[in-house]
Image (tube, rainbow, N blue to C red):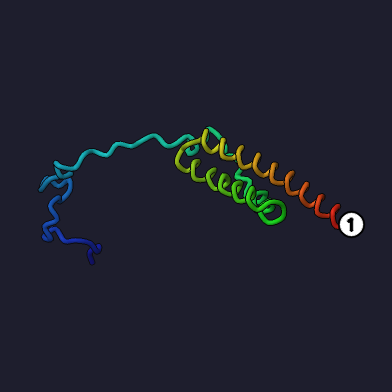
């Protein structure tokens, strides 16, 4: 019984290291490996995304600032995957700042609504 795969008679062009044919074909450039991004090497930890806080701000306090914070939260992961560590840290910091402003504005708004209703 033989292993599945193309037969040597199929004419695949390169037959391997047996000496017959070209291995690899001469028009294929050599493979060069790039060093992994810094987050793969384990140099720094991924910054927090602040997703839960962004959703709470969006739903309970101030939806516009919550939406802006969710945008920055999504940018943390996107930039981290692309190897932009400084950008991911900045997006995390921006998400936290916008969330805190949203909580402050939202609390002030609800206090004013409750005070005006009494």
x, y (%) of residue 80? 50, 41
Q: Is residue 105 above or below residue 114?
A: above
Q: Is residue 111 above or below residue 30?
A: below
Q: Say whether residue 105 is left or right of residue 66.
A: right
Q: Nearer the viewer, residue 86 or 14?
A: 86
Residue at 36% in and 35% down: 34
Residue 58: x and y in percent read 66, 53
Residue lying at the far bottom of the rendered structure: 1
Image quarter of residue 22: top left
Q: Residue at x 16, y 61 (%)?
A: 7
Q: Is residue 47 left or right of residue 32?
A: right
Q: Quadrant of residue 113?
A: bottom right
Q: Report the front residue among 77 and 22.
A: 77
Depth check: 117 or 95 in front?
117
Q: Residue furthest right?
A: 118
Instruction: Please report the residue visible at 23 percent of the width from the left and 67 percent of the height from the top.
Output: 1
Circle 1: is it few (<14), some (14-19), or many (20+) Cα within 10 Å?
few
Q: Quadrant of the C terminus?
A: bottom right
What residue did someone put label 1 on?
118
- Say what secondary structure mark 1 lies in: loop
Judge left or right: residue 116 versus residue 74: right
Left or right of 15, for residue 53: right
Identity of the residue furthest to the front in this view: 116
């Amino acid at each position: 019984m033989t292993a599945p795969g193309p037969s040597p008679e199929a004419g695949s062009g390169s037959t391997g290291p047996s000496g017959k044919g070209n291995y690899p074909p001469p028009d294929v450039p050599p493979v060069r490996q790039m060093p992994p991004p810094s987050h793969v090497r384990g140099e720094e930890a991924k910054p927090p995304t602040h997703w839960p806080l962004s959703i709470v701000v969006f739903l309970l306090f101030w939806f516009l600032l919550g939406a802006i914070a969710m945008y920055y939260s999504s940018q943390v992961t996107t930039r981290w995957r692309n190897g932009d560590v400084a950008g991911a840290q900045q997006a995390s910091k921006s998400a936290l700042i916008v969330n805190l402003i949203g909580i402050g504005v939202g609390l002030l708004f609800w206090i004013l609504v409750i005070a005006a209703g009494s």
